[in-house]
């Protein structure tokens, strides 16, 4: 009977107490003359009743007695933990990156000191042999620093460490990952100072913890979904996992505002949206990662909604590629359909 | 056996919940412990039915209350706590199922212990998923008589909707919002879940009605 098939949804809505008055009338009228549908309704009622008393292995009573205490202990231990940026910095994953960064820093410093030692031994620079162009770090020195006469040692240091100042100076709280990102390889630093008097341009602070522009991404690495940040086009890039370099460092709301203003800013300079690609996809990607990460940390309705919106917004503009796959996979976890 | 009736008996009105929430917001630990005591069985039951693993259900139950504590400021006083806590628990369970569990092994292929089972009892041996061979499943009297196992054999998305509607008594609209799907999808998943259960429990409920031919 076609009626039954057509009215199945209505009958089930009636059983679920979700039918409107009109639907209820239609369904009840049908049920009066259809024993098969009445049987189905009886099955649904029985299924509901049985399901609500469905058993499962019961924990011992001591489990229930201790659970409130365990919850309170967890709350206490979390409240004792440092919050905000400090907790991010002290998170195990960040500590690992910090340890790696510190190791690289030590290696770099050893390399630089060896180089300086070699320079003094083999070819001491003349007092007047200033670099052809003063490094950005030098240009931005404080008036007090400018008033101090330059020594051969300080010049060599300025050349050997062209990008040391800006990132950390602008944000003292920059996490270990950002420090790691901004560190050129020790070997390349050595090459830069030994082979050329022209210093490498310092990395702008905005580049730290943001995606690099197209030119900065090494294709072979991009395929592995690892993004690169380099302070010197000649330097071997230092790569960090994308999620680490962005989601933990950025404020989703700030990113959301930046994305919202993309349309207005698109016509302006290449500096729009923090070294963004012209179409704003980088900013949207960062926002999507940020929102998804926030939802992973705290699965609230609101964060889930935002994560879905931000992910879909990014995918609408960039539906293919490694980044799209990354976002799509994360999105599937919170929105299976 | 964990009794939902018992869990219900421990729950309070929105007004009483509100009083406890206000005290907990002011730092009264006993008040929050009382909230945990009142709803722990209910929340554990939600998590256990969805994940079917005690250790996971335990984690989800604790996480639910920890998150609830962190967000007490957002709770609307006067409303009952149960739906709010349930939503948090369901979200956590869905996150778990969509992540770790899906990569490991679909839970609905597991052979659940018969009946309430014993505490700490490991699941029995695996068997072929029902939807891979419905005829064989129909022949299994053991399976047909076991509602718990039949529910566990439902595909994840159908099982989730079924449990939220039938056991947690949520409305279509609430489920749709929680899962990020349309109400129509909620209804169709629920209908498919019930149809599948009807087939699996055929020996228990008698012959499947032929009228209509569609279910």
Image (cartoon, coloured by chain):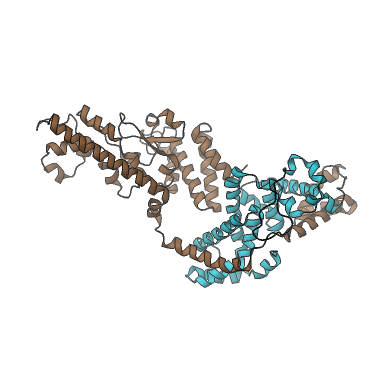
Looking at the image, residue A336 sits to the left or right of residue B214; the answer is left
At horizontal 66% and vertical 66% (from top left) the residue drawn is: B7
One can see residue B74 in this view: no
| Image coords of residue B203 (percent x, y) | 84, 51
Q: Left of A27 or right of it: where is B123?
A: left
Q: Residue sitting at 42 percent across and 32 percent down?
A: A278
Q: Quadrant location of residue A125?
A: top left
| Residue A27 relative to residue A236: left or right | right
The residue lying at 35 percent from left, 46 percent from top is A99
Q: Which chain is cyan?
A: B
Residue A227: x %, y % from top left: 41, 35
Look at the image and give the colour of chain A. Answer: brown
Does residue A260 lie above or below A127 as drawn? Answer: below
Closer to the camera in the image, B7 or B182: B7
User: B149 and A147: which one is in front?
Assistant: B149
Can residue A311 be seen in this snapshot?
Answer: yes
- Percent across and percent down for residue B164 are 67, 54
Instruction: From this view, report whether residue A282 is shown above or below residue B195.
Output: above
Query: B45 left or right of A85?
Result: right
* Numbered marks: total: 0
**Closer to the camera in the image, A156 or A201:** A156
Q: Position of residue A187 (x, y in %)?
A: 28, 32
The residue under the point 27% across, 46% down is A169
> Which part of the image, by quadrant, shows the C terminus of chain A?
top right
Taking depth in this image into account, of B196 and B181 the one nearest to the observer is: B196
Rendered-image quadrant of the N terminus of chain A: top right
């Amino acid at each position: 009977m076609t009626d039954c098939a057509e009215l199945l949804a209505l009958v089930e809505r009636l059983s679920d107490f979700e039918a409107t008055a009109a639907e209820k009338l239609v369904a009840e009228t049908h049920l009066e003359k259809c024993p098969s549908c009445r049987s189905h309704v009886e099955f649904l009622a029985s299924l509901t009743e049985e399901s609500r008393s469905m058993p499962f292995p019961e924990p011992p009573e001591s489990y229930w007695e201790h659970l409130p205490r365990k919850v309170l202990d967890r709350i206490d231990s979390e409240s004792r933990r440092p919050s905000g940026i400090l907790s991010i910095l002290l998170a195990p994953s960040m500590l690992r990156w910090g340890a790696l960064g510190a190791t690289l820093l030590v290696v770099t410093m050893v390399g630089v000191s060896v180089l300086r030692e070699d320079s003094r031994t083999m070819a001491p620079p003349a007092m007047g042999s200033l670099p052809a162009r003063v490094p950005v770090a030098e240009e931005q020195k404080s008036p007090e620093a400018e008033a101090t006469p330059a020594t051969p040692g300080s010049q060599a240091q300025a050349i050997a460490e062209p990008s040391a100042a800006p990132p950390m100076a602008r944000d003292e709280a920059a996490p270990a990952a950002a420090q790691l990102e901004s560190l050129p390889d020790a070997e390349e630093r050595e090459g830069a100072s030994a082979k050329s008097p022209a210093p490498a341009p310092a990395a702008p602070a905005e580049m730290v913890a943001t995606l690099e522009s197209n030119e900065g991404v090494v294709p072979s690495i991009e395929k592995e979904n690892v993004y690169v940040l380099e302070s010197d086009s000649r330097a071997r890039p230092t790569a960090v996992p994308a999620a680490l370099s962005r989601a933990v460092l950025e404020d989703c709301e700030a990113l959301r505002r930046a994305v919202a203003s993309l349309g207005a800013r698109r016509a302006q300079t290449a500096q729009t949206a923090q070294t963004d690609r012209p179409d704003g996809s980088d900013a949207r990607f960062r926002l999507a990662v940020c929102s998804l990460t926030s939802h992973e940390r705290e699965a609230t309705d609101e964060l889930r909604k935002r994560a879905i919106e931000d992910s879909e917004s990014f995918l609408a503009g960039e539906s293919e590629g490694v980044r799209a796959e990354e976002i799509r996979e994360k999105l599937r976890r919170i929105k299976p359909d | 056996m964990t009794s939902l009736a018992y869990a219900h008996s421990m729950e309070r009105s929105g007004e009483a919940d509100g009083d406890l929430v206000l005290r907990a917001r002011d730092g009264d630990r006993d008040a929050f412990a009382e909230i945990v005591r009142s709803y722990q069985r209910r929340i554990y039951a939600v998590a256990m039915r969805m994940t079917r693993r005690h250790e996971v259900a335990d984690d989800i139950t604790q996480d639910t209350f920890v998150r609830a504590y962190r967000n007490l400021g957002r709770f609307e006083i006067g409303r009952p706590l149960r739906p709010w806590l349930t939503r948090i628990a369901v979200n956590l369970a869905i996150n778990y199922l969509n992540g770790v569990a899906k990569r490991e092994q679909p839970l609905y292929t597991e052979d659940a212990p018969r009946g309430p089972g014993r505490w700490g009892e490991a699941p029995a041996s695996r068997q072929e998923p029902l939807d891979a061979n419905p005829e064989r499943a129909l022949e299994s009297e053991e399976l047909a008589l076991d509602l718990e196992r039949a529910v566990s054999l439902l595909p994840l998305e159908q099982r989730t909707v079924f449990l939220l509607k039938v056991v947690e008594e949520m409305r279509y609209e609430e489920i749709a919002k929680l899962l990020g799907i349309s109400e129509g999808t909620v209804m169709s998943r629920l209908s498919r879940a019930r149809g599948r259960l009807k087939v699996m429990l055929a020996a228990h409920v008698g012959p499947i009605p032929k009228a209509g031919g569609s279910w």
